[in-house]
Amino acid sequence: MPGQKNTVVRIKDIALKAKVSTGTVDRVIHNRGRVAEDVKERVLKILKELNYEPNIMARMLGSKKQYVFAALLPDHTYDAFWMAPKLGIEKAEQDLKQYGVQVEQYVFNPHDPQDYVKMATKLTKRQPDGILLSPIYYNETLPFFEKWNEAKIPFVLFNTQIAEYDPLSYIGQDSYQSGLLAAKLVHYGQPNPCSILIAHIDEEIHNAQHLVKKEQGFRNYFIQHDLTHHYNIISVELNRSSQSGFIKKLDEILESTLDLKQIFVTTSQAFDIAKYLKQRHVKNIKLIGYDLITPNLYYLETGEISFLINQNPKGQGYWGIYQLAEHLVFKKEVPILKYLPLDVVTSENLNYFRDEKDDTFVEI
Amino acid sequence: MPGQKNTVVRIKDIALKAKVSTGTVDRVIHNRGRVAEDVKERVLKILKELNYEPNIMARMLGSKKQYVFAALLPDHTYDAFWMAPKLGIEKAEQDLKQYGVQVEQYVFNPHDPQDYVKMATKLTKRQPDGILLSPIYYNETLPFFEKWNEAKIPFVLFNTQIAEYDPLSYIGQDSYQSGLLAAKLVHYGQPNPCSILIAHIDEEIHNAQHLVKKEQGFRNYFIQHDLTHHYNIISVELNRSSQSGFIKKLDEILESTLDLKQIFVTTSQAFDIAKYLKQRHVKNIKLIGYDLITPNLYYLETGEISFLINQNPKGQGYWGIYQLAEHLVFKKEVPILKYLPLDVVTSENLNYFRDEKDDTFVEI
DNA sequence: TTTTATTGTGTGTTCGCACACATTCGATAT
DNA sequence: ATATCGAATGTGTGCGAACACACAATAAAA
């Protein structure tokens, strides 16, 4: 690499060349003022000339600045899905501990918007240096975005995207694209005409917008590939609050749709349909769902579920916190939008995706 | 987490508690000797008790030790596959630069064992602190393993595994498992009886052992699922050195196997079969292959290739170097065997796996 | 016994940066 | 003219670990 000095440039070197003290250079670098305009110019010029890059190690060591990040996320005792982000957040905290990063978790009842607001308020009072949240309540969230913008506290969204305000970044999946992917898998496994069911289960828990996009993607695959006249795609919203209602509804669909060959579950509750199919001894209907939660994995192993699309929830938590650190601690630029890979998981490659011990292996 | 102190433990704290000086603690930590046995025990105990973890920043700053790693890998101009590991290695070098890590690449002509030995010799002369290599020539490699063991230079293998000697770790995929995965995909897309072709192309370039394991995994899937009487699985070795011979062989197979519905290509040359199928206007044969190289991606987009299994070659390079750093720089324990995830790639989720810019997103 | 290794232990300096504090200098006010 | 103030600049210390060195105590060799 041309022009690249192999001797590392230090503040001292800059000071020497600019004929000032290190203190002055320091003031210029951190823009702390109290430097004559001409001197500042001179130092800035040399800084650029020598391509000065601060030594991160020394910087960290010197300033004992502590960073407090706050994470706002649903309580995993209500929905097991949220266990993974929590683990990711904690892993990130562990990795970043030595850089003075500390993460406080604010968990709320995902069924209760009031609780969401309450915890968000509490979090805001704490005045953290950065915020990570899954903004599952749209309207309730917006006022906080304004507050945080005013207070210049960067926030990162995960799992649920709200595009109206500009977060530092969004970490999650492209729901539309994941619908397309699911459709591809369905189509690949079912090349002949048939009926396909899209099932949204317990939609009010996760943000409904996700599910809509998944369905759009799914349906558009068939439109784009000019397959609409071969496939009869129906969609249904199911609710598990009443177990008998849930089963009755499914019974109805199966009775009225004799050529039903595939079910695409847009949430992580595929296992409930799998259970139903097993009970009814239905063998010829294939199932695709989301998320590697335990009951899903069981049916993936037994074959009731063909594929699970991994939303990498642990990674969402991990990278969310990591983004904040990249921005605040390492002062790097971070991408505004970051979609995580859409992992196709079967019982054959499951091992590499499930959360084993401290596995940090990864795609780069 | 119970028992977790939130105050960071320093050498000073250990020294205080053990009623010795920091120098003594330092000697114990680095096992430099010159410490009375009983004192050593005491310090060690307290070290463990307080769960001491050295401050990386301070460690790096204090010792300006530079690490030289050497990477031995095939020249990507002979086989595009090797571009990705190279990029991964360079990315790791970039990430680790600030910790004083420097990587030297030794590239060889993958068709020439002599060149392999020549570069390995050159590398060995350099006496690097750590070595990363893809040992594609078994016999030629063993003597070097001995030399490196003697010189106590840790080495990491990637892509090709040699189990006889004990490397610091192996980074790559589980070929057998990837065969199973491919079989699952084939079976899912072709539930009805048919013939299936396993094609090994240009096998002498990559290590043949890989391909054998892939085939084993593939065939065993059908055995395990008691499907052998439904499927006729044939395998063939193709060589592209003669284009006409390549085509002739395929013509023969297609003529003699009328119910051929799926082809599983165990190498990254699926695109060549795809090209053939397109030329012959064969529409009803599905194709599964490996690796996201450009020609494969083209046929993945156009639909000739159904799935590609991503071997994550960039990740192999990246994590290989990273493992060395974990061991030598960060003094962490590293897993001996590290299998990278088996990614199922279609045109719908391709974007998240192909190497875009600086993407560092990942599963954790 | 004195000298010389050997072992055990403590002290001090260094790394590059951040930040608190000290100093200089000129301008204005008294 | 001298005190006062504030802007501009310099100096000094600490962060935590690594490592060189100093010194003490003891053991071995003279």
Image (tube, coloured by chain):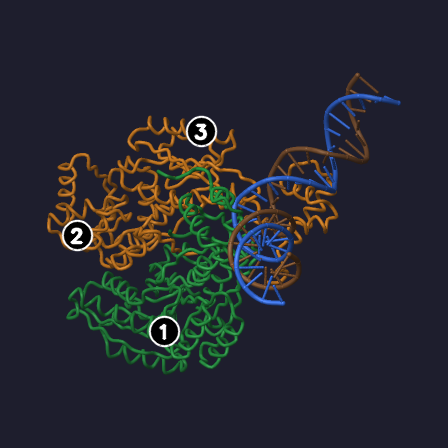
Chain colours: A green, B orange, C blue, D brown
Secondary structure found at label 2: loop
Q: Between C22 and A364, which is closer to the camera in this rendering? A: C22
Residue A140 vertical position relative to residue A325 in the rendered view, above or below: below
Q: Which tag, 3 or 2, sits closer to the chain's start?
A: 3
Q: Residue at x 32, y 62 (%)?
A: A306
Please name which of the two marks, 3 or 1, marks the residue nearer to the observer: 3
Q: What residue sits right under mark 2 in the picture?
A: B259
Q: How far across and how far down the image is residue A218, in percent?
A: 25, 68
Secondary structure found at label 3: helix
The label on residue B126 is: 3
Q: How far across and how far down the image is residue B211, in percent?
A: 31, 41
Please name which of the two marks, 3 or 2, marks the residue nearer to the observer: 3
Inter-mark Cα distance, 3 to 1: 64 Å
Residue A43 vertical position relative to residue A110 in the rendered view, above or below: above
Q: Between A277 and B44, which is closer to the camera in this rendering? A: B44
Q: How far across and how far down the image is residue B140, in percent?
A: 38, 28
Inter-mark Cα distance, 1 to 2: 36 Å
The label on residue B53 is: none
The label on residue A276 is: 1
Q: Residue at x 23, y 57 (%)?
A: B190
Residue B185 vertical position relative to residue A150 in the rendered view, above or below: above
Say few, some or many: other residues with alpha carbon within 10 Å of mark 2 (under 14 / 14 to 19 / 20 or more). some
Report the amino acid beneath label 3: Arg
C16 with respect to D24 (left or right): left
Is residue A19 visible to us here? yes
Chain ID of residue with mark 3: B
Report the amino acid beneath label 2: Asp
User: The N terminus of chain A is located in which quarter?
Assistant: top left
